[in-house]
Image (cartoon, helix red, strand yellow):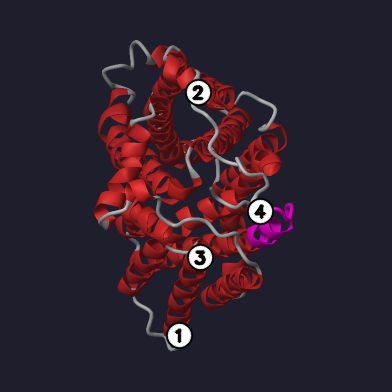
Amino acid sequence: MEQRNTQGMGVFILVWLGQILSLLGSGLTSFVLGIWVYQQTGSITQFALISMFAYLPSVLLSPLAGTLVDRWNQRWVMLVCDTGSGLTLLVIAYLIVNERLAVWHIYGAVVINSIFSSCHWPAYMAAATLLLPKQHLSRGTGMMQIGDASRLVAPLLGGVLLDTIQLWGVILIDCITFAIAFVTLVVVRFPEVKAVPPSTKGAVLQEAAYGWTYIRERVGLLALVFFMAGANFLLGVVEIIATPMALSFTSPTTLGTIFSIGSMGILVGSFLVSHWGAKMKLIYGVLGSQLISGLSVLIVGFHLTVVTLTIAIFVSFWGLATLNGCSQLILRKKVAIEVQGRVFAFSRTLADATIPLAFGVTGFLADQIFEPLMANNGLLAPTVGQVIGVGPGQGMRLLVMIVGCLTVFMSIYAWQFPRLRFVEKELPDTIGLTS
C-alpha cells in the first residue's frame, strides 16, 4: 500500500504556492503573446491558432503522459517540465531582445509548453494526493482550483504590464515564476509510492489504455467523466460567444469589468469546495452547480444587460470551479493512487476533448446560422424575434438561451442515472488506507 504524507499541510502549501505563481506567469505570457501575434498579423485566425496550439498537444498526449507519470517520480516530472518551460521562455526572451521574434516562433513555443504541460498536470494531480493528509483532501482540492482563477486574472494584469514593461518584461516575470516553482520542488520531498502495480505492467501504450479500462469498468466514474465532457462543451460555447455578444451592446472597458467580476466566481467555488467538500455529498455539487449555471445563462438570453451578463459569467465560473473541484475529489478518493496519473490523464482527455470542438463550431453557428435567423428580415424574426428582439447580436442571444436549456436538461437527465447519482456510495474509497 502507498505511504501518505504525515507532515500536515505544510509541504503541500509550499508546492501549491509555487504552482499558483507559475500558473499566473503562464497566463500573463499567453495573453501578451496572443496580443503580439494579433498586432503583428491583424489576423483573428492566427490569433486563435495560439490557443489551439497551446491546448491540443496537452489533451492528445495526456493518456500517454499519465502512464509515464505513474512510472516515474512525480516530483522529478514536475521539475523537468518546469525547467523545459522556463528554457523555452528564455529562448523567446532572447529573440525579443534581439528583435528576431517571428510568429512561427510563438507557435513552436506554445506547442513545446503544451507538451510539458501534458506531463506536468497529471504529475501535479497525483502528487497532491500523496502530499495531502486524508482529512484535508477537500481543502487541498479547492485550493488547487484557485489556479484557474489566476489564469483569469492574468489578462487584467497583462494589459497593464504590456503597456508598462512591454513583452520582454512579461516574459521575464514568467521566467521568475517558473524559477520559484522549481525551487519549491527542490526543497521538498514526496512520499514514496509503488510506480506500477503488478496487474498493469506492460507496454507503455497498453498502460495508457489502462486509464480508459479503469474508468470504463467503473460505470459511475465513466458517467462522471462524460458529464464533465458535456459541461465543458456547453461552457466552451458560452466562453466564446460571451465577448462578441457583450461588445454588441457595450464597450471593451465594460467587458473587462464584467470578466473581472465574473472571474471571482472561481474563487468562491474553490473556497466552498475547499471548506465544505469533506462534509457534502460531492455529486450534489457536480450536478447542482451545472443546473444553477444553466439557469443563469438562460436568464441572459431573455434579459441581456451588463448586470445579468456579469451574474451569468460569475455563476458559470463558480459552477466550473465547483464541478471541477467536486469531480476531482471524487476521482481522487475512488481511484487507486498507483494509477492516478494515467486515470487522471485519460479522464482529462475525455472531458476536455469537447472544448476545442466547442471553439470550432461556435463561430460557425453564430455567424452562419443564428445571426442570419435573427436578422431584421430573418426567418425567426416574426416569432422568436418578437420575444428577444432582432438585429446584430440577437442570434447570439438565442444560441446562449439554447445552451442554457441544454445545461439544465443535462443536469436533470444525469440525476436520473443511478450509477452516477450513487457513485460515492457504490465505489469504495481507495486512499488513506494506511493513514
Queried whether the magenta region covers residue 7, the answer comes back as yes
Q: Looking at the image, is mark 2 or mark 4 earlier in the sequence?
A: 4
Residue corresponding to mark 1: 94
Query: Which tag is nearer the camera, tag 2 or tag 3?
Result: 3
Q: Secondary structure at mark 4?
A: loop
Residue 237 numbered tag: none
Q: Earlier in the sequence, mark 1 or mark 4?
A: 4
Most distant residue in the bottom direction? 98
Q: Quick one: 235 or 240, which is closer to the camera?
A: 235
Which residue position holds label 3?
A: 78
Residue 55 in view, yes or no: no
Q: Is residue 44 left or right of residue 299?
A: left
SS at badge 2: helix
Residue type at the position of mark 3: Met
Label ID, residue 294:
2
- For discs 1 and 4, the disc positioned in front in the rendered view: 4
Helix, strand or loop at label 1? It is helix
Q: Which residues are magenta?
A: 5-17
Main SS of residues in magenta: helix
Closer to the N terminus: mark 2 or mark 3? 3
Whether residue 341 is visible here, answered yes or no, is yes
Residue 171, position in %: x, y? 53, 74
Query: Going 51% across and 52% down the picture, which residue do you hit?
Result: 126
Please check the rendered image and state whether residue 55 is part of the magenta-colored stretch, yes or no: no
Depth order, front residue of 170/243: 170
Q: CA distance from mark 3 to mark 4?
A: 18 Å
* Residues at marks 2 and 3 touching, judged by CB atoms closer than 8 Å: no
| Residue found at x 25% / y 56% | 203
Q: Residues within 10 Å of mark 2 (few under 14, many from 20)?
A: many
For badge 2, the amino acid type reads: Gly
